[in-house]
Image (cartoon, rainbow, N blue to C red):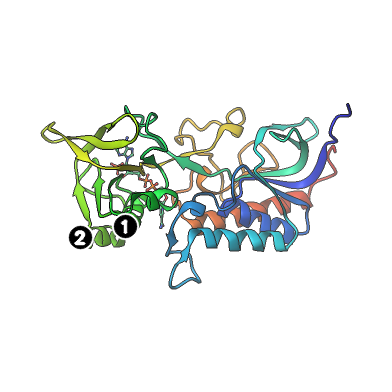
């Protein structure tokens, strides 16, 4: 049996969300061989976002899946190749300065520069019943699962933009949506808060922490919540539980290379998206310690990282293959 040959490229981009796709667009337009590795579908978190209203050039808004498709097409148009459903399982810097990437497809790639734009994944509450009823009433994606709850009662949990926007989306299907948040104040943008307050199908359950997801052994029947002010508990009778309690950066590949203890797992980068102390390594998008986590800022940092990577590649002598 012969071993698969190592493939050598200029720029490897890990993650095919808005940051990675934009980096791919800039890389390929910079005339360097560019490969984007994406373990799922392209688009990252927007692929499962129903509607995006704050990405410029779409005054009426645009569906997340359509925006993902447009970004993907534009990235591929200029020659970047997208390795879809391929997970990069390890990333190491070789003595000669190149990076070696291993994938779950069994391939080895060498890249002269790497942009990690692996994004973030939804957090879980970790309460009893969550694991048992995942896929049987517990979900992290309203766009994917709202259709199962036509004329049913569901609960959305969280007080950020995701929770409020997805609660509003759920009202298109469900007859009633509880919105459970652990404080009285929301961290979501005021326009989303206003829309939620105006929506007659949404009932706010504030200062309440979710304690347990209950069911009949087959599917979800309720969510037990506790009021943090008087410790009283109640069970909300619901058919579906949608959790939107934040996101965790996907940082495993850089765990050995970068200290993220001071940035809650996010990768610290400078204004050119460089990772300190590792020439040729860049990070972009929600994985980084940037303050704004939006599609526009992810795309912007993907462009910044690729621009810096192109400059780095320009100045670089040939490395190992
Ligand atoms: P987020 O802004 O971090 O909000 C998470 C929410 O979950 C917070 O309200 C938090 O409560 C609550 N929470 C966290 N842990 C909890 C727990 N254990 N139990 C109960 N509640 C808990 O997360 P996100 O809404 O997913 O948004 C992530 C980023 O993407 C944000 O920067 C957001 O602005 C951005 N985003 C933007 C858009 C848009 O522009 N259209 C859409 C979606 C997301 P506390 O408030 O008490 O901490």
- Whole-percent x and y of residue 78? 73, 62
For this view, does 248 lie left or right of residue 109? left
- Whole-percent x and y of residue 149? 34, 50
Mark toward the start of the polypeptide (1 vs 2): 1
**Residue bearing mark 2:** 200
For this view, does 70 lie left or right of residue 142? right
- Whole-percent x and y of residue 292? 44, 52
The quadrant in which residue 4 appears is top right
Can residue 89 be seen here?
yes
Up the image or down, 65 lies above or below 246; here it is below
Q: Quadrant of the C terminus?
A: top right
| Mark 2 element type | loop
In the image, what residue occupies the spot 53% across and 38% down?
A: 250
For this view, does 70 lie left or right of residue 56? right
Of residues 109 and 115, the one nearer the viewer is 109
**Residue bearing mark 1:** 168
Whether the residue under disc 2 has CB within 8 Å of ligand 1: no
- Label 1 to label 2, Cα distance in Å? 10 Å
Task: Bin the neighbour count of mark 1 within 10 Å (Cα to Cα): few under 14, some 14-19, many 20 and up.
Answer: many
- Whole-percent x and y of residue 127? 32, 29
Q: Which mark is residue 272?
A: none
Q: Quadrant of the N terminus?
A: top right
Can residue 288 be seen here?
no
Task: Bin the neighbour count of mark 2 within 10 Å (Cα to Cα): few under 14, some 14-19, many 20 and up.
Answer: few
In the image, what residue occupies the spot 43% across and 72% down?
A: 60
Of residues 292 and 162, the one nearer the viewer is 162
| Mark 1 element type | helix
The quadrant in which residue 181 appears is top left
């Amino acid at each position: 049996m012969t071993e698969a040959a190592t493939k050598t490229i200029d720029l490897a981009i890990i993650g095919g969300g808005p940051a990675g796709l934009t980096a791919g667009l800039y890389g390929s337009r910079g005339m360097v061989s560019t490969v984007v590795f994406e373990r799922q579908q392209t688009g990252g978190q927007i692929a499962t976002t129903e509607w995006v209203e704050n990405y410029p050039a779409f005054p009426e808004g645009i569906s997340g899946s359509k925006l993902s498709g447009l970004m993907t097409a534009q990235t591929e148009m200029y020659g970047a190749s997208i390795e879809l459903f391929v997970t990069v399982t390890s990333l190491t810097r070789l003595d000669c300065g190149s990076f070696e990437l291993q994938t779950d497809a069994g391939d080895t790639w060498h890249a002269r520069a790497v942009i990690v734009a692996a994004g973030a994944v939804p957090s879980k509450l970790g309460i009893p019943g969550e694991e048992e009823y995942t896929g049987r009433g517990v979900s992290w994606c309203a766009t994917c699962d709202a259709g199962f709850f036509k004329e049913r009662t569901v609960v959305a949990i969280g007080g950020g933009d995701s929770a409020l926007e997805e609660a509003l989306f759920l009202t298109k299907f469900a007859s009633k949506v509880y919105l459970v948040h652990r404080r009285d104040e929301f961290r979501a943008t005021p326009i989303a808060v206003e829309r939620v307050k105006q929506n007659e199908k949404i009932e706010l359950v504030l200062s309440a922490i979710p304690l347990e997801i209950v069911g009949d052994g087959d599917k979800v029947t309720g969510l037990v919540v506790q009021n943090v002010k008087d410790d009283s508990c109640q069970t909300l009778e619901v058919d579906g539980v949608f959790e939107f309690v934040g996101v965790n950066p996907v940082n495993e590949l850089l765990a050995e290379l970068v200290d993220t203890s001071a940035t809650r797992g996010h990768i610290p980068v400078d204004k050119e998206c460089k990772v300190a102390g590792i020439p040729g390594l860049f990070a972009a998008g929600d994985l980084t310690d940037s303050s704004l986590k939006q599609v526009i800022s992810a795309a912007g940092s993907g462009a910044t990282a690729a621009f810096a990577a192109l400059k780095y590649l320009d100045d670089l002598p040939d490395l190992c293959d």
